[in-house]
Amino acid sequence: MSQTLAVWLWIALALISANLPFLTERLFLILPWKQGSVAKPFWLRLLELLLYYAVVMFLGFAFEAALGNPFAQRWEFYAITFSLYLVLGYPGFVFRYLFKRHPVAP
């Protein structure tokens, strides 16, 4: 796999995984959330977002190790990448919480 392909694959994976908690009602994309008619709470969506971030970072480090020399990262790297990950998840947040859904007229 070339470095360019790995970078674009990683970015696409980050974009998709950052929006998944807001677009599905399943817990970690596997378990259905059955708590009556109540939607998944926001704190659970944030927990999913953190887990998906960890998975994306792990895959990014795996790509880096497979393609060349892995570099040690400090806290600044994680703060910046998590901020960018939150920005990638903004469309899903807007769709879930900020769009007003109007009832369909009969």
Image (cartoon, grey):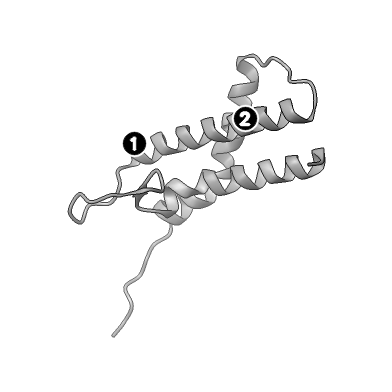
Q: Amino acid at mark 1?
A: Trp
Q: Earlier in the sequence, mark 1 or mark 2?
A: 1
| Residue under pointer 2 | 81
Q: Which residue is at a point 40% across and 53% down the rendered structure image?
A: 24
The spot of residue 89 in percent (x, y) is 53, 44
Residue 7 percent coordinates (x, y): 74, 40
Counting every numbered tag in the picture gives 2
Residue visible at 41% across and 48% down?
29
Residue nearest the observer in this picture, 25 or 68: 68
Q: Secondary structure at mark 2?
A: helix
Q: Residue at x 66, y 27 (%)?
A: 61
Pointer 1: what residue?
A: 43
Q: Which amino acid lies under the numbered mark 2 shown in the image of this protein?
A: Thr
Q: Position of residue 56 (x, y in %)?
A: 58, 35
Picture quadrant of residue 63: top right
Q: Foreground: 19 or 1?
A: 1
Q: Are marks 1 and 2 in contact (CB under 8 Å)?
A: no
Residue 96 position by quadrant: bottom left
Q: Secondary structure at mark 1?
A: helix
Mark number displayed over residue 1: none
Relative side of 5 to 34, left or right:
right
The quarter of the rendered structure image containing the N terminus is top right
Residue 73 placement (x, y as % from top left) = 67, 16
Looking at the image, the residue that sits furthest to the bottom is: 106
- The residue nearer to you, when weighing 101 against 59, is 59
Left or right relative to 75: residue 95: left
Q: Residues within 10 Å of mark 1 (few under 14, many from 20)?
A: few
Q: Residue at x 33, y 78 (%)?
A: 104
- Given the current orientation, which residue lies at the most extreme left position? 36
Q: Please indicate whether residue 32 sits to the left or right of residue 50 in the image.
A: left
